[in-house]
Amino acid sequence: MPRLHPAFARREPSDMEEQLKKKEDELKQAEEKLATAQAMLAAAAAHGGKNKRKQDTLNKEMQTLIGELVKTVVWRECKFLTSADQEKIFVNQVIEAMGKTEYDGNEAEAIKKRAEFHVIYSKFCVTTLNGHRNYVQSSMRTKFDKWIDAGKDLPPFGDLLKCAQRNLPVRPDNHNTIIFYADWMMTKFCGDASLYSNKVRYYHPISLATSTLNCSCGPDITPATEAFGLLVLENNYTKWPKLKELTAGLSDAEKERVQVLAKPSTNKSGTAIKKSHHFYVTDHPELGTKYTESSAGQRVYGGWTTRGINRFVQFRKAIKKARNSDEGKKWEAAVLQVMRDANNITEPTYEQQREKDGGRGAKPPPEPAKVVEDLFEDDDTDEEGIGELHEV
């Protein structure tokens, strides 16, 4: 007997209801996309029209707010944007972090407001994220140089990987490494002096230290933030000390003109043309970096290679797994005590320590920040397969 084509096969009521629900959802999504597209076209047409001076003022106010949100909220989880879709998600996260009710919901006016925001501020949001990422790297280099200026030894990078995995033995011969990683360099991973400050990092483990009133927003140093800091260190661990050595005799103005290039250009005869204040990886291999291309600038991932992005994701997964383990929690508790001892902290809270030291009471911490979705969040089922981190 011939079989009935699946398209004409009898379906159970539950199957038909499910198919109908799916079609309704698809129609709703299509309607929302159409409304968004229409709103974006209207916003694009209106932008730059009448009342330009008033619009410029509003832009500046909004840009200031966006800058603060990217620094203190969105940066906690988002470091790179690797596709146009992620850029849209990122901008929506900025909108969500604003907490303004006029942007919420699926009503026509809310859709229009979000569309206008995308048209006017999307590029600025992305530029702000790229700029903050560069600022964090610059701040880390300054802090790194100060460690060297103080005559302190740089720990082997392999030991920093162990810190990230929470398995470096917490004993006196490793205290230098622990202080360098958790108490010195980590203060610059956020790119904001109010986060992971001495008001919190000497009183709570890394995974719990938060500068906000409400711990539900997560720690100042999220796994993503720690992973990015570790990535920057690995990328520059030979470059920064060598560059400091090569520029030791230069004035600050001269240092501003310093560039690191892969190799010098050549003339028609093939002779290398070397310029003053230019240093070349061909002459000093230590100046080479693992994951960035200085010529890339703001293109693609701001100069970071795909290999660097993948290394970041590997770091984030390993750090998250280590933090969630019992061994990791014990390690962080032991590290906290090392940091407290090194800084003569004896009281349980910052306010009590300030009072003991004869200082005035601390200012209240800022209002809690909203949590944003991790754009690189993966299914936790993968974590069982994460191996030990090694130098590359």
Image (spheres, helix red, strand yellow):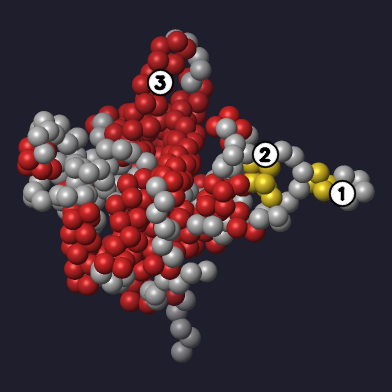
Answer with mark 3 or mark 2, whichever residue precedes in sequence: 3
Between tags 3 and 2, which lies in front? 2
- Closest to the camera, between mark 1 and mark 3, is 1
Query: For mark 1, what is the residue?
Result: 271
Toward the viewer: 8 or 346?
Answer: 346
Packing grade of label 3 (10 A; few <14, some 14-19, many >=20) is: few
Q: Which residue is mark 2?
A: 277
Q: Is residue 85 visible?
A: no
Indicate the position of residue 202 as horizontal and vertical percent values: 19, 50
Measured as percent of width and height from the top left, residue 55 is found at: 42, 16
Q: Residue at x 44, y 16 (%)?
A: 56
At label 3, the amino acid type is: Lys
Could you tell me which residue is drawn at 33 percent across and 33 percent down?
68
Left or right of 84? Residue 97 is left
Q: Which label sits on residue 60?
A: 3
Q: CA distance from mark 3 to mark 2?
A: 37 Å
Residue 252 in sight from this viewpoint = yes
Name the residue: 41% across, 21% down: 59
Q: Quadrant of residue 341?
A: bottom left
Residue 53 vertical position relative to residue 41 in the rendered view, above or below: above
The secondary structure type at the circle numbered 2 is: loop
Q: CA distance from mark 1 to mark 3?
A: 50 Å
Q: Nearer the viewer, residue 383 or 326?
A: 326
Mark positioned earlier in the residue sequence (1 or 3): 3
Q: Residue furthest right?
A: 269
